[in-house]
Structures are given as C-alpha cells and as structure tokens.
Image (cartoon, grey):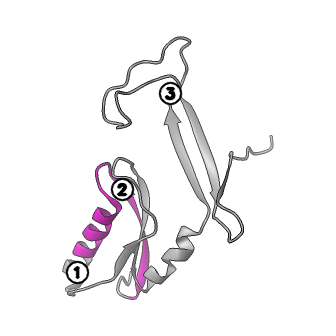
C-alpha cells in the first residue's frame, strides 16, 4: 500500500471515538511508520461519537475522492425494540422493558440516494429479493 500516493481505508469506528479521532490515529500511525513529518488524511462522512460503524478514511491523493465517496448510495442498518425507553437518547443507560404488548426486536434498513441538484436525498425501504 502506498499511503503517500493515496489509499482508501475502511475503519470500524468504536464507540466514543469522533470521526476526527479516527483521522488523528491514522495520521499519527502513518507519520511514525513512514517516518514523515506530514501526510494528508481525511474522512468521507461524520459518525456521531456515540455511534459505531464503518468510516472511510483517505490518505494522500485519495483525499481528492472524498466528495465522490460522500455522494454515493449509503445503507443504514439498525436493530431496535419497539416500545422500549431509556432515560435519555444516550445508548449507554439501561433501558426499561417495553410495555405490553411486548414487541420483538426488528431490523430495519434504508437505502438513501445522494441528493441531486434538483432534489434532496430520498430514502427508500430495502428491496426484497424475488422468491
């Protein structure tokens, strides 16, 4: 891999890291390993510090591709329990069980198209394969 010329990295961002924390860690590791003072590093989209998931980090000349990467189609996947509550929107506190009728966890997925010049982004329910 040639990080100075440009690479695209996919990082599983842990809970508590900001997107910039991921950039700082990649930049720090690369400057030490490559023995350079400076390397261009950027991310293609922000994840909340309380969210986990894949963040795209680009190095070198690949940082010029960040805009096109952000414009791509994205998929969001979540698992939730309908009817459960938490004392706040923070995912770390304990939740109270759902009130009757009890609901089982549901997996949801949305495919979002990038915004065009004429319209804002549109999210569509996932398509199901034909049986």
Circle 1 residue:
31
Residue extent of the magenta highlight: 5-28
Q: Is residue 11 magenta?
A: yes
Label drawn at residue 81: 3
Q: Position of residue 2 (x, y in %)?
A: 38, 84
Spot occupied by residue 78 in the image (x, y as percentages of width and height): 52, 41
Residue 125 in the image: above or below residue 97 = below
**Earlier sequence position, callout 1 versus callout 3:** 1
- Residue 13 circle label: 2
Q: Is residue 32 left or right of residue 100?
A: left
Name the element at disc 1. Answer: helix
Say whether disc 3 or disc 2 marks the residue closer to the N-terminus: 2
For the point 52% across and 75% down, which residue is it? 67
37 vs 106, left or right, is left
**On the picture, is 50 further left or further right than 36?**
right
Task: List the single residue furthest toward the top.
Answer: 100
Q: Residue 130's image quarter?
A: top right
Mark 1 is surrounded, within 10 Å at the Cα level, by few (under 14), some (14 to 19) or many (20 or more) other residues, namely some
Mark 1 or mark 2, which has the lower sequence index?
Answer: 2
What residue lies at 32% left-to-right and 48% top-to-bottom? 15
**Residue at mark 3 to residue at mark 2: CA–CA distance:** 24 Å
Whether label 3 touches label 2, CB < 8 Å: no
């Amino acid at each position: 891999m040639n990080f100075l010329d440009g690479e695209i990295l996919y990082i599983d961002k842990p809970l508590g890291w900001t997107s910039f924390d991921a950039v700082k860690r990649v930049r720090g590791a690369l400057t030490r390993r490559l023995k350079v003072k400076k390397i261009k590093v950027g991310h293609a989209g922000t994840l909340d510090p309380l969210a986990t998931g894949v963040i795209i980090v680009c190095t070198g000349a690949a940082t010029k591709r960040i805009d096109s990467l952000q414009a791509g189609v994205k998929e969001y996947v979540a698992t939730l329990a309908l009817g459960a509550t938490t004392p706040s929107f923070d995912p770390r506190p304990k939740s109270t069980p759902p009130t009757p009728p009890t609901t089982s966890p549901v997996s949801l997925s949305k495919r979002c198209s990038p915004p065009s010049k004429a319209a804002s982004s549109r999210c569509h329910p996932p398509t199901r394969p034909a049986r």
